[in-house]
């Protein structure tokens, strides 16, 4: 198992957020959040040290673009976790890394491994 | 000629337009068994099947059949020629030949008749009924020549409707019987019967009885008496055959009866005479004569002629043209040997216009071409179906015109006159008039070509014989002007036989005494006199006329005016003319006649018409009586001066007379000139006439062509109208579709465009004809040219979507090849279709599909999560299943409600009812106004209510029968609040662990909706307070 990571989870659907969080915890990672909205997420980023982030694209009437931008400025790697394919997300997201929903444990962990290569 | 079978006549019936009523008359006028066979030949349209046999079948009891090839002709049968064939007969068997489509036989009647004549001889009968054209005339000629019978329909009150065909045959003089259609039948039956009766007459001529010989001699006599021809030299058999034919026609059964009839009816003598002389002019009839013509005469005609000269030949009585065409062929052959070709004109004349029409057409059945050598046939004729047409190079030499040798002014300055077998039809007096006319018509030294039984008669002073046997003569040089004038006085008698049979007795063996005495007295004492005819020719001289008449210089003459001595001529001419016109005796006193040695004699001149002597020529007695002694001229003049006036007056009178004389001579010269001018005019007229006929013919052709063109034109007009309609349909279509369409040709030049296209390329109507590349368009389509080239290359339609333009519209460009009817690519059609709506719909569709994807995936993630959480909180498999299924059902119910409301909103009432129904709704107390929640709120609330109800049923109020739940909700400002309060349940304990149900409640309401959940575990039951903000931005 790789080093424990502090993973920010942004997901407006509680059940899904809970599932991802469960999965991450089970793998020994620490979950920051989950946050259901941009504001909540940005707050968490400000308060916590975040190694890596998993973002849902559509957040109950807003997109997670602002979060993504904030993460980019902070050089925090992240992946978009969404049911949309890269073609269907707003064009600003087009170049980000994607993990398709529903994502099982393996998909999530391998995405994390990719984002934060073991040093 | 089958001997075992009884021979019967075969009747060819020729008919054309108007032939049906004529045939009806013919067959209805006949019994059912006439003892003959009939073959009907008609002009049929090759395109239509003929029903003629059925039509004819109604008119006769005889069986009627359509001819098939090889049909044997039987008596009492009627055969009908089918369409599209040429019919001939051989040995009594009919033969058909398919006629060529290209050269349709135009004279089927001539073809069949001539075949019939050849095959059946005197048993051939040709009937010519109503029809246009002159078909049948040549056929009748062939039948007549072989001794057959020819019949033509004569006009009566009803028919023939188209008289041209029978008229042509009748006027050719070849028709034995001309009768109305209804009467022909009876005459034919009589004719057929007569074969039996008269079989002894000709065929069995070997044992001629003396009675027969006597009757024959009698007929010879009658003929000679009327016509002057002696037929005793004819072959007896031929002679009798002709007699038999006449008897058949006259329906007489014995020669004696016929002789009686001959004596009674001079017309029958004429008919017999004609029949005996029946001469069907073949080409090169009498080959020897034509050989002589070819070798001796024709080269002479061309001798010394240059290209500007012309050789003129006159063929009077040309009939159907065989003779003149024969000469034409000889001339044509000779012309080919000449280095210099003079103009050749053959004036062919006849009074019989229908015959001339036949001649002009120059179309002959093969049977009539027998006189021709195969070489000439090959050289000069082209076969057109069954008949042969003379080549144009001979026809163009000949000018045909109606003209009477006897009545009309003659032609002049001819190099040759060919008049074979015409004179035999004329009586001797007409012959005597015609021969000088021929002399007049000829140039000095010109040739006259007569038939073998004709001669120049007494006029050998006009013609020198070139060949006695072949009757070729040469005109002598002749100075006498008077012999040329055919008529001094307008005597226009014609007719051949009028003057015959009155020959004066020449034998003067013994005069009675009284006559001798009278003769002597007359000779001694009567005044000198002469008898002249109307032309002034002396026919009788008395003694001692020498003082008044003297032989003039030049060739001998009998003309009294030429003979008269000086001084007498004027008075004599005047007196003769007066006597001829007034028919009274004219006396002139004191006429001065010059004598020798300046002496003159006064005489009394008397001209007295001689008493009428039968039908002969009028004659005049001219008496010269001296009325004083011979005196010297001076004495007379003096005497006259003394007696009546002065010598001056006398001299003046003489001068006046001389002037008169010269005036008269001038007048005569002028008359001559007028005559020759007239002749010129006649021949010019003929040429004009023939060109007129040609014009008429071409006019007819033009007319039918015109009709055809009219038809085509009206068809075209219809097509144009259709085109117009189609065009306007297309234009309307273009305009209504609003599809921008441009037609370009191979060079990308705009051919046409629709109004919708004008905006794309800034096209104006004046831009048609300009290359598209020159036009500035608003279209951002730089590849257009390449695409068009690609379409030209591949011939396939090309579709191209243009990028969204600045007005946000999408266009699809379609480039179609423009193919002509041979499938060649002549250009392209560019269409621009606005597909904005389509594109937008498609976009929307795409959005929907991705949304659906998203939702489904989300849902699956949710389900997965529920399953995970449920499993965690379940103790047994059954519990897990029950809880999971319950939750899934709750979700599915919520989704059902939302989709019913089209994902717009969710009614709180319906939502609660739906979720609480499985837990018996009557145990709940619902209190609150209707609130519309957003879909997400509805979904989350449904899940929450489901968790609460499940929990209540398991552990709370609903686990006890009397337990109840009260729900109360309201909206306070922006906040929705719902209170869940359980009563009368089992005692409540706060659970040690926050169970999944409560977590879910917290997650859905708190996390998801940003709301709040407060739980109070009161004694009498669980109480849950749920609040969340109503207005929160919602994602679909």
Image (spheres, coloured by chain):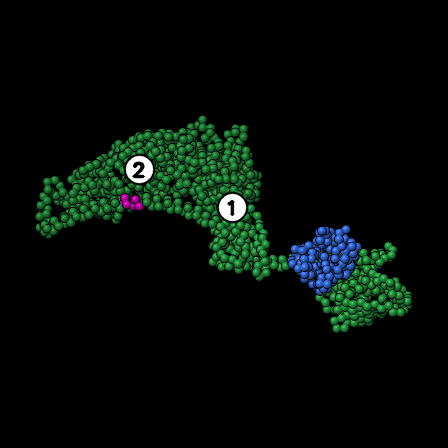
Chain colours: A blue, B green
Residue at horizontal 86 percent and vertical 54 percent from the top:
B877
Q: Is residue B888 left or right of residue B28?
A: right
In reply to whether residue B919 is colored magenta, the answer given is no
Discs 1, 2 touching: Cβ within 8 Å: no
The residue that mark 2 highlights is B342
Which SS type dominates the magenta stretch?
helix
Q: Chain of mark 1?
A: B
Would you place residue B994 above or below residue B675 in this image? below
Residue at horizontal 18 percent and vertical 38 percent from the top:
B552
Residue at horizontal 47 percent and vertical 37 percent from the top:
B385
Q: Quadrant of residue B498?
A: top left
Can you say which quadrant of the picture contains the C terminus of chain B?
bottom right
Residue situated furthest front in the rendering: A119
Taking depth in this image into account, of B875 and B415 the one nearest to the observer is B875
Residue A52 appears in view: yes
Q: Nearer the viewer, mark 1 or mark 2?
A: 2
The residue that mark 1 highlights is B21
Taking depth in this image into account, of B478 and A41 the one nearest to the observer is A41
Q: Regarding mark 1 in the picture, which secondary structure is present there?
A: helix
Q: Regarding mark 2 in the picture, which secondary structure is present there?
A: loop
Residue situated furthest bottom in the rendering: B973
* Residue B739, position as x, y percentages in the image: 57, 57
* Residue B84, position as x, y percentages in the image: 52, 40
Would you place residue B990 above or below residue B346 in this image? below
* Residue A81, position as x, y percentages in the image: 72, 56
- The part of the chain drawn in magenta is B675-681
């Amino acid at each position: 198992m790789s080093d424990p990571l502090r993973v920010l989870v942004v997901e407006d659907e509680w059940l899904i957020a809970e599932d991802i969080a469960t999965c991450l915890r089970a793998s020994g990672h620490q979950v920051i959040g989950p946050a259901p909205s941009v504001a909540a997420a940005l707050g968490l980023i400000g308060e916590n040290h975040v190694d890596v982030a998993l973002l849902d694209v559509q957040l109950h009437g807003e997109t997670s673009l602002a979060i993504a931008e904030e993460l980019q400025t902070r050089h925090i790697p992240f992946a978009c976790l969404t049911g949309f394919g890269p073609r269907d997300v707003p064009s600003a997201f087009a170049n980000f890394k994607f993990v398709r929903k529903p994502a099982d444990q393996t998909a999530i962990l391998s995405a994390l491994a990719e984002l934060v290569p073991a040093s | 000629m089958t001997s075992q079978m009884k021979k019967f006549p075969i009747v060819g019936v020729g008919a054309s337009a108007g032939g049906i009523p004529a045939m009806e008359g013919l067959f209805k006028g006949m019994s059912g068994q006439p003892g003959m066979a009939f073959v009907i030949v008609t002009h049929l349209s090759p395109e239509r099947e003929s029903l003629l046999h059925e039509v004819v079948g109604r008119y006769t009891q005889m069986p009627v059949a359509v001819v098939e090839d090889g049909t044997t002709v039987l008596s009492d049968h009627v055969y009908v020629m089918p369409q599209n064939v040429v019919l001939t007969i051989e040995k009594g068997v009919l033969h058909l030949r398919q006629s060529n489509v290209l050269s349709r036989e135009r004279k089927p009647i001539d073809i069949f008749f001539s075949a019939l004549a050849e095959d059946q001889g005197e048993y051939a009968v040709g009937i010519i009924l109503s029809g246009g054209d002159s078909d049948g005339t040549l056929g009748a000629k062939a039948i007549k020549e072989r001794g057959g019978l020819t019949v033509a329909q004569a006009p009566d009150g009803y028919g023939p409707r188209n008289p041209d065909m029978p008229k042509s045959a009748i006027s050719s003089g070849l028709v034995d019987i001309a009768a109305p259609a209804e009467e022909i039948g009876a005459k034919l039956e009589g004719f057929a019967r007569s074969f039996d009766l008269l079989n002894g007459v000709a065929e069995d001529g070997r044992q001629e009885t003396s009675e027969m010989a006597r009757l024959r001699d009698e007929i010879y006599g009658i003929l000679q008496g009327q016509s002057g021809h002696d037929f005793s030299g004819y072959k007896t058999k031929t002679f009798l055959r002709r007699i038999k034919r006449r008897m058949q026609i006259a329906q007489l059964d014995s020669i004696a009866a016929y002789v009686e009839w001959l004596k009674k009816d001079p017309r029958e003598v004429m008919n017999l005479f004609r029949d005996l002389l029946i001469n069907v002019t073949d080409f090169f009839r009498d080959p020897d004569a034509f050989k002589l013509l070819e070798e001796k005469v024709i080269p002479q005609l061309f001798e010394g002629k240059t290209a500007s000269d012309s050789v003129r030949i006159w063929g009077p009585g040309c009939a159907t043209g065989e003779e003149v065409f024969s000469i034409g062929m000889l001339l044509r052959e000779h012309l080919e040997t000449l280095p210099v070709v003079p103009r050749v004109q053959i004036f062919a004349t006849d009074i019989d216009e229908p015959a001339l029409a036949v001649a002009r057409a120059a179309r002959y059945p093969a049977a009539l071409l027998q006189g021709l050598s195969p070489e000439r046939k090959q050289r000069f004729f082209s076969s057109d179906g069954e008949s042969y047409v003379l080549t144009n190079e001979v026809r163009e030499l000949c000018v045909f015109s109606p003209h009477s040798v006897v009545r009309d002014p003659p032609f002049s300055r001819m190099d040759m006159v060919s008049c074979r077998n015409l004179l035999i039809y004329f009586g001797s007096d007409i012959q005597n008039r015609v021969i000088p006319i021929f002399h007049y018509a000829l140039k000095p030294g010109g040739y006259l070509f007569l038939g073998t039984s004709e001669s120049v008669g007494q006029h050998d002073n006009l013609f020198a014989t070139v060949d006695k046997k072949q009757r070729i003569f040469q005109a002598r040089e002749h100075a006498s002007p008077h012999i040329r004038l055919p008529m001094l006085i307008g005597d226009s008698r014609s007719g051949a036989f009028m003057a015959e049979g009155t020959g004066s007795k020449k034998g003067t063996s013994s005069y009675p005494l009284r006559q001798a005495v009278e003769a002597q007295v007359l000779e001694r004492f009567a005044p000198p006199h002469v008898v002249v005819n109307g032309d002034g020719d002396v026919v009788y001289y008395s003694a001692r006329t020498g003082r008044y008449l003297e032989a003039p210089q030049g060739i001998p003459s009998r003309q009294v005016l030429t003979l008269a001595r000086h001084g007498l001529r004027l008075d004599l001419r005047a007196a003769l003319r007066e006597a001829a016109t007034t028919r009274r005796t004219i006396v002139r006193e004191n006429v001065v006649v010059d004598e020798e040695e300046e002496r003159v004699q006064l005489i009394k001149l008397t001209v007295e018409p001689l008493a009428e002597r039968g039908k002969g020529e009028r004659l005049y007695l001219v008496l010269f009586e001296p009325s004083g002694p011979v005196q010297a001229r001076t004495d007379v003049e003096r005497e006259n001066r003394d007696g009546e006036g002065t010598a001056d007056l006398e001299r003046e009178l003489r001068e006046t007379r001389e002037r008169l004389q010269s005036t008269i001579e001038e007048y005569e010269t002028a008359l001559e000139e007028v005559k020759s001018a007239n002749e010129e005019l006649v021949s010019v007229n003929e040429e004009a006439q023939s060109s007129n006929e040609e014009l008429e013919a071409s006019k007819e052709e033009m007319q039918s062509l015109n009709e055809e063109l009219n038809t085509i034109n009206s068809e075209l007009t219809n097509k144009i109208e259709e085109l117009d309609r189609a065009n306007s349909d297309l234009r309307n279509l273009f305009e209504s579709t609003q599809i921008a369409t441009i037609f370009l040709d191979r060079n990308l030049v705009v051919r046409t465009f629709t109004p919708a296209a004008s905006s794309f390329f800034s096209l104006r109507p004046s831009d048609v004809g300009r290359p598209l590349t020159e036009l500035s368009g608003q279209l951002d389509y730089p590849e257009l040219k390449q695409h068009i080239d690609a379409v030209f290359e591949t011939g396939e339609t090309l579709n191209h979507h243009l990028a969204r333009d600045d007005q946000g519209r999408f266009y699809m460009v379609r480039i179609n090849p423009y193919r002509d009817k041979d499938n060649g690519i002549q250009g392209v059609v560019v269409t621009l279709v606005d597909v904005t709506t389509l594109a937008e719909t498609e976009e929307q569709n795409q959005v929907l599909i991705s949304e659906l994807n998203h939702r489904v995936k989300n849902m699956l993630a949710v389900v997965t999560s529920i399953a995970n959480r449920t499993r965690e909180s379940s103790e047994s498999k059954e519990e897990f299943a029950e809880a999971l299924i319950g939750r899934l059902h709750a979700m599915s119910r919520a989704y059902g409600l939302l989709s019913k409301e089209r994902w717009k909103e969710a009614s709180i009432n319906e939502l609660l009812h739906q979720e609480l129904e499985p837990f018996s709704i009557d145990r709940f107390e619902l209190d609150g106004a209707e609130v519309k929640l957003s879909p997400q709120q509805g979904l989350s609330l449904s899940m929450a209510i489901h968790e609460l109800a499940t929990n209540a049923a398991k552990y709370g109020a609903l686990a006890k029968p009397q337990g109840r739940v009260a729900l109360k909700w309201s909206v306070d400002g922006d906040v929705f609040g719902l209170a869940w309060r359980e009563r009368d349940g089992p005692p409540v304990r706060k659970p040690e662990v926050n169970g999944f149900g409560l977590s879910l409640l917290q997650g859905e309401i708190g996390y998801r909706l940003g709301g709040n959940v407060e739980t109070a575990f009161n004694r009498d039951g669980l109480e849950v307070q749920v609040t969340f903000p109503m207005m929160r931005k919602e994602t679909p």
